[in-house]
Image: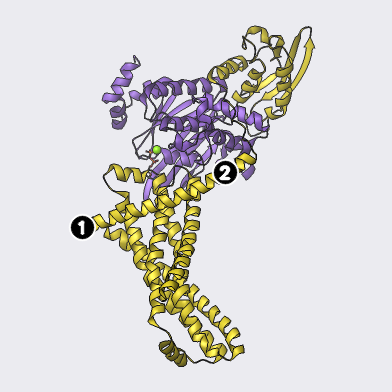
């Protein structure tokens, strides 16, 4: 595996019963890059994310984290590794019985010791950073709109200033202006903090605007990983359809590319 | 910059010194979310005691920094008219200044929650609110009953609107599956009543009256009461949880939008099932209770089963059985109504689901016992 790979997936096989999702899948996430992951609905993007996060046991193959096999880490190491991850789940997965501020404070409580007042201030700062208005901080997730819930979930994902951010369709359900602001926030954070980002997305504009490389999931494996321009020349039929179909052309034209 | 590996991080340190009119805040080590907790107090003191324009932050020996660190450093100068001015900083750092500005630009400090007040007036207020809530709960439950009745009547005229499959399913859940536990409980209650009778009546030489004692107690009260309480604990909580979970996932909203009436699809089948199965369960409970009493009478007092049954037939009126049975559908209805209504009240969060399930069990047991007392008064006045 390459030296600068932060996370490497090798020979991964996952299945639900007889239903095989991934077969012999390889993927490298390099330190400091923003990697986009695209693929048709139901091709197993979320399942791949869950497997990388250790939430689902692979049926074959391994996930390496900085060269260490994730399954072989001790409990304490795994805890420390987890504190460096921020995850934005597809449906937000906020704790419904806590306010937004308490949601953001939950990982802080678990992983660091600091005065309560500072913790509340930092939670407020993260909420602002994610683009939510201060009034939203003391509301419950059920009182928020879908887009606001996404932002609250992002604030929680950012709570520990993770090194690696996993985003599952972060801009789905946001208005275009909100989605663009979200993109610029991710880009700014990744540059200022050296964040590594894995972003599952269907948003062609996001791919154009911020992704350094794009991985395509098709036929149960990662069919291609390349910067977007190179990827668009890939002859694979699904990739051609994806980038050169009507929506793909419109987004490319919008970027002046 | 970043890229900390699995090793520990340097702790954050701060030294404050006076340099002429300026107060210089020297930062050491890594300022990340793990490390800043200890330096919070020192920075707060600087912010509160120093004129904002005189604060200078020395970044020379600052290690790694993240947004939490940038926030706490930027906080020191936030009262200055020009919080990110060059005169505030000495020393170079690859990312600190940019990050501090970025965090400040994107942050609007959230207002603190208003402190809650305690006191006598508040306590009275809570009592009042509690009473009002109780009355409105009762009113709403009656309203819910009315609405269910209306749905029931309208599907009497259009029988095709009655959902047969969910009704049968609910009957199996509420009735068949609950029978073993209810019969077992009732068996033991009958046995306990017989033991009590044995103790009391043997002393008086009337041990044969155990038959009447067991018969009347089980037929009139215990059979139906055990059934109602088990329905409340078992089926009513299940109704609330099932409907509540659907409410949480917006399934109920989806039904409405699709033109399905949740009362017809969710509430009515459960109410019908519960009302119909309660008498059957009660009958089972009565049989089991009498059987338990009979066994105890046989073993402890030598009243043979044949004597027990003969005396049972001779001495006990059918009215006891009918009184017990007449209460069963009422209890079944009340339990089902309360369970379904609480389920429909669940909001969007898990906590309200838990609260509603608890409320539903408490309310239905409460209602069963109050109704039981009313029935007792009613039948006493009627002389049955
Ligand atoms: N818990 C599960 N049990 C069985 N099959 C599942 C489960 N989760 C996902 N799948 C299947 O795995 C496939 C990939 O799902 P997913 O990763 O959610 O797709 P997407 O790429 O749209 O995120 C789908 O065919 C789905 O049916
Ligand atoms: Mg998905």
Q: How crowded is mark 2: few (under 14 residues within 10 Å), some or many (20 or more)?
A: few
Closer to us: A143 or B210 = B210
Image position, residue B239 (x, y; %)? 41, 56
Q: How crowded is mark 1: few (under 14 residues within 10 Å), some or many (20 or more)?
A: few
- Chain in purple (letter): A
* Residue contact between numbered discs 1 and 2, judged by CB atoms under 8 Å: no
Is B30 above or below relative to B265?
above
- The colour scheme used here is by chain
For image coordinates 37% across by 63% down, the residue present is B274
Mark 1 = which residue?
Answer: B157
Closer to us: A42 or B233 = B233
Is B22 above or below relative to B119?
above
For image coordinates 37% across by 43% down, the residue present is B250
Front position among marks 1 and 2: 2
Q: In the displayed structure, does residue B15 sit left or right of residue B353?
A: right
Is B140 above or below relative to A177?
below
Mark 2 = which residue?
Answer: B126
Q: In which quarter of the image is the C terminus of chain A?
A: top left
The chain ID associated with circle 1 is B
Closer to us: B361 or B23 = B361
Q: Which of marks 1 and 2 is nearer the N terminus?
A: 2
Q: Residue A29 carries which label?
A: none
Disc 2, SS = helix
For image coordinates 30% across by 24% down, the residue present is A248
The chain ID associated with circle 2 is B
- Specify the quadrant of the image occupied by residue B314: bottom left
- Chain in yellow (letter): B
Image position, residue B375 (x, y; %)? 44, 68
For image coordinates 51% across by 91% down, the residue present is B303
């Amino acid at each position: 595996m390459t030296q600068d790979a932060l996370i490497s997936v090798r020979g991964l096989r996952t299945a639900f019963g007889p239903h095989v999702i991934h077969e012999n899948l390889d993927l490298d996430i390099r330190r400091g890059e923003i990697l986009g992951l695209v693929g048709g609905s139901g091709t197993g993007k979320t399942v791949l994310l869950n497997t990388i996060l250790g939430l689902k046991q692979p049926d074959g193959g391994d996930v390496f984290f900085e060269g260490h096999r994730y399954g072989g880490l001790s409990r304490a190491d795994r805890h420390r590794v987890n504190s460096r991850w921020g995850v934005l789940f597809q449906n937000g997965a906020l704790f419904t019985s806590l306010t937004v501020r308490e949601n953001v404070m939950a990982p802080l409580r678990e992983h660091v010791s600091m005065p309560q007042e500072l913790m509340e201030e930092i939670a407020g700062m993260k909420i602002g950073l994610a683009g939510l208005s201060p009034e939203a901080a003391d509301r419950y997730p059920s009182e928020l709109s879908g887009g606001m819930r996404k932002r609250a979930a992002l604030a929680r994902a950012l709570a520990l200033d993770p090194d690696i951010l996993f985003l599952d369709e972060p801009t789905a359900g946001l208005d275009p202006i909100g989605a663009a602001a979200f993109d610029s926030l991710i880009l700014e954070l990744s540059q200022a903090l050296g964040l590594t980002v894995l972003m599952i997305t269907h948003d062609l504009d996001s791919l154009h605007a911020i992704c350094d490389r794009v991985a395509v999931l098709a036929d149960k494996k990662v069919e291609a990983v390349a910067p977007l321009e190179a990827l668009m020349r890939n002859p694979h039929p699904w990739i051609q359809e994806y980038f050169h179909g009507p929506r793909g052309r419109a987004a490319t034209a919008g970027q002046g590319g | 910059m970043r890229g900390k590996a699995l090793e520990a991080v340097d702790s954050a340190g701060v030294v404050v010194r006076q340099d002429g009119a300026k107060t210089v805040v020297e930062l050491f080590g890594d300022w990340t979310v793990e490390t800043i907790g200890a330096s919070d107090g020192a920075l707060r003191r600087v912010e509160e005691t120093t004129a904002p324009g005189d604060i200078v932050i020395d970044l020379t020996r600052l290690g790694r920094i993240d947004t939490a660190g940038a926030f706490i450093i930027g906080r020191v100068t936030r009262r200055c008219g020009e919080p990110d001015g060059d005169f505030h900083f000495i020393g170079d750092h690859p990312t600190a200044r940019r990050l501090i500005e970025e965090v400040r630009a994107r942050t609007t400090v959230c207002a603190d929650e208003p402190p809650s007040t305690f006191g006598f007036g508040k306590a009275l207020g809570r009592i009042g609110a509690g009473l009002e809530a109780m009355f409105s709960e009762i009113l709403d439950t009656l309203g819910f009953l009315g609405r269910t009745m209306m749905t029931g009547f309208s599907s009497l005229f259009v029988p095709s609107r009655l959902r047969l499959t969910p009704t049968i399913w609910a009957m199996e859940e509420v009735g068949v599956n609950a029978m073993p536990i209810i019969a077992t409980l009732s068996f033991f209650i009958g046995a306990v009543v017989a033991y009590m009778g044995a103790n009391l009546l043997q002393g008086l030489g009337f041990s044969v009256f155990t038959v009447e004692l067991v018969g009347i107690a089980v037929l009139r009260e215990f059979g139906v009461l055990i059934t109602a309480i088990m329905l409340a604990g078992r089926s009513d909580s299940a109704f609330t949880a099932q409907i509540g979970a659907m409410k949480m996932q917006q399934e109920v909203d989806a039904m409405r939008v699709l033109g399905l009436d949740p009362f017809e699809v969710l509430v009515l089948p459960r109410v019908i099932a519960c009302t119909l199965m309660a008498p059957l369960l009660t009958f089972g409970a009565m049989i089991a209770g009498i059987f338990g009493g009979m066994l105890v009478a046989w073993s402890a007092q030598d009243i043979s089963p044949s004597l027990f049954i003969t005396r049972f037939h001779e001495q006990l009126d059918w009215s006891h059985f009918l009184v017990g049975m007449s209460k069963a559908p009422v209890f079944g209805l009340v339990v089902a109504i309360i369970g379904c209504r609480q389920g429909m009240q669940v909001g969007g969060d898990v906590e309200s689901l838990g609260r509603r399930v608890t409320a539903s069990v408490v309310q239905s047991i409460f209602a069963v016992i109050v109704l039981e007392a009313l029935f007792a008064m009613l039948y006493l006045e009627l002389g049955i």
